[in-house]
Image (cartoon, rainbow, N blue to C red):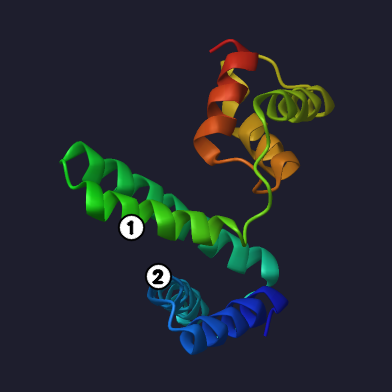
Amino acid sequence: MSTLKDLLTADLRTALKARDELSTSTLRLALAAIGNAEVAGKVKRELSDDEVLSVLTKEAKKRREAATAFADAGRTEQAAKERAEGELLDRYLPKQLGDEELTELVRGALAVGGFDGKAQLGPAMKASQAAVAGRAEGGRVAAEVRRQLGS
């Protein structure tokens, strides 16, 4: 079992004992998503910490998108709940890069790969995503790569 999954399980037990409903429900949903990812495919397998981080990132993104949708629909109470769940999941994710840090990492990845022009967007994105290593959302990385490639 990955250490991050162990941490989530331990935190779930603590939340259950403390009768913290928000943490309990959020961590249960996160662990269920991790369990679904483990059984996806032909053979059940244990996820690495990086794969668990990927699942948590997707879950946190779902919460942010749902909060925005609820807020736009005027359902402020549900939007606040989704935001709180997203913030709880963010505690388990690596610190997100600032704009300047992201710009520098993408610039370095493009320079190392020798990428220039929008025709090389795919390989440039792959190199940039590897350099960022999950510390920024894909949309932000894509926007920065496009900006630096001039497309």
Q: Using residue 112 as the reference point, say whether residue 44 is left or right of it.
A: left
Q: Are marks 1 and 2 in contact (CB under 8 Å)?
A: yes
Between residue 79 and residue 149, name the one nearer to us: 79
- Could you tell me how far apart the alpha carbons at marks 1 and 2 are, in whole angstroms? 8 Å
Q: Quadrant of residue 90?
A: bottom right
Q: Using residue 94 as the reference point, say whether residue 34 is left or right of it.
A: left
User: Is residue 43 in view?
Assistant: no
Residue at image coords 50%, 89%: 17
Q: Position of residue 62 (x, y in %)?
A: 38, 53
Between residue 66 and residue 105, name the one nearer to us: 66
Looking at the picture, does residue 40 appear above or below residue 84?
below
Q: Position of residue 48 (x, y in %)?
A: 68, 73
Q: Residues within 10 Å of mark 1 (few under 14, many from 20)?
A: some
Q: Position of residue 61 (x, y in %)?
A: 44, 50
Disc 2 residue type (three-letter): Leu
Looking at the picture, does residue 91 appear above or below residue 41?
above
Q: Which residue is mark 2?
A: 22
Q: Residues within 10 Å of mark 2 (few under 14, many from 20)?
A: some
